Amino acid sequence: MGRPKAWLPFGNERMLQRMVRLLVDVADPIAVVHAAGQSLPDLDRPVLRAIDARPDLGPLEGMAAGFATLPETTDLVYATSVDVPFLAPGWIARLAIEIGEADIAIVEAGGYLQPLAALYRRATVLPAIEGLLAADRRRPAFLIDQLATRRLDESMMRSVDPQLSTLKNMNTPADYHALLDEAGLPRGRAVIELHGVPRIRAGFARLEVCAGSARGAVEQLVAAAAGRLDGLLEDGRLHRAYKLNLNGERFVDDPDALVVDGDELLLMAADVGG
C-alpha cells in the first residue's frame, strides 16, 4: 500500500479507529497488534496493545502476540486484519453461535479458508500457534489440521452479511479506491504547494486536488495551469527536472503512489538546494 493501513482515512476516521468502533459492541477486550515503534491513530476507546516482535513470521506470530496479551479468562478470540472497513459485527456473533465445543470456527469462501475472519478458542489455539512457530510452520491453515474445527460455508454467513463484505480487504491502492467508491467516499483531497520554478511558471502557489495517486494530482495541477506547466509529466511520470515531496516525509518517485485525504504535496525543481 505504501503506507500503514491503520492510518488510511475512511470517511471521517482512520481505518484502525473504524475497526475498533465496529468491534466494540461484540468484542471485549480488544487487542491491537502492531510492530515495534509503529505509531497508531488516537482511539477514543481503551484497547490492549501487543507488539509483533517478529512481523517477518507472518500472521501466526501476530496472532500469538495478540492472544497472549488478552486475559487468560478470555474464551473466544476473533482475529481480523485492520483493512476490512465493511466488517459486519453480526459475522462474529454468528461464529460464536456456530463454534460449539470446537477450537476454531472458520468460513470457507471463494474456495479459500478465511483465517483472519475466524473465531478461535484461546486456551487451545495459543499453545498450538506457539508450537507451530517453534517448528517453523507459519501457515494458519496448519491450525486446522491439528485442532477441532467447525467449517462454515459462505452461504451460512449471508444471513448476517449478505454480500460477504466482512471479507473485502485492501492490499493495493486500487483495492482501497474501490472500497472508497463503494462507500461513496472521495478518493483523496490533497493540497499541492508549488515552490520556486513551478510556482513562477504556474502563476499560483497552491492548488487543492482530489486524486487517489501522485500522477492524478499532478495531472490536475497541469490542467489547472492551462498550458503553463506542460511537460511536467513525461511518459506518465514526473519529469526528472522536478521532485514531488509527500507530507514533508519522502520524495515520491512512483506515479501510482497513494494520495489520501489530508495529504500535502510539495512540487519543486530537482536542483533546489543543489
Image (cartoon, rainbow, N blue to C red):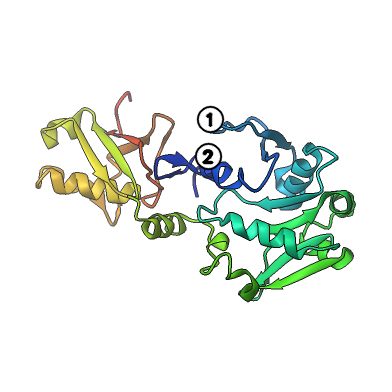
Q: Is residue 19 above or below residue 167?
A: above
Label 2 residue SS: helix
**Residue at coordinates 74% horizontally, 37% vertically from top-left?**
53
Disc 2 crowd rating (10 Å Cα; few below 14, some 14-19, many 20+) is: many
Q: Is residue 164 in sight in this rendering?
A: yes
Residue 37, quarter of the rendered image: top right
Residue 159, quarter of the rendered image: bottom right
Residues marked 1 and 2 touching at CB (< 8 Å)? yes
**Residue at coordinates 81% horizontally, 43% vertically from top-left?**
74
Residue 177, how many percent across, how many down?
Answer: 40, 56
Residue carrying label 1: 42
Q: Of residues 124 and 155, which is closer to you in this image?
A: 155
What is the number of callouts on the image? 2
**Residue at coordinates 29% horizontally, 51% vertically from top-left?**
216
**Residue at coordinates 15% horizontally, 49% vertically from top-left?**
223
Kindly identify the amino acid type of the residue bearing the numbered disc 1: Asp
Q: Is residue 216 above or below residue 199?
A: below
Residue 108, how many percent across, how many down?
Answer: 68, 71
Residue carrying label 2: 17
Kindly identify the amino acid type of the residue bearing the numbered disc 2: Gln
| Quadrant occupied by the C terminus | top left
Q: Is residue 230 in sight in this rendering?
A: no
Q: Of residues 172 and 77, which is closer to you in this image?
A: 77
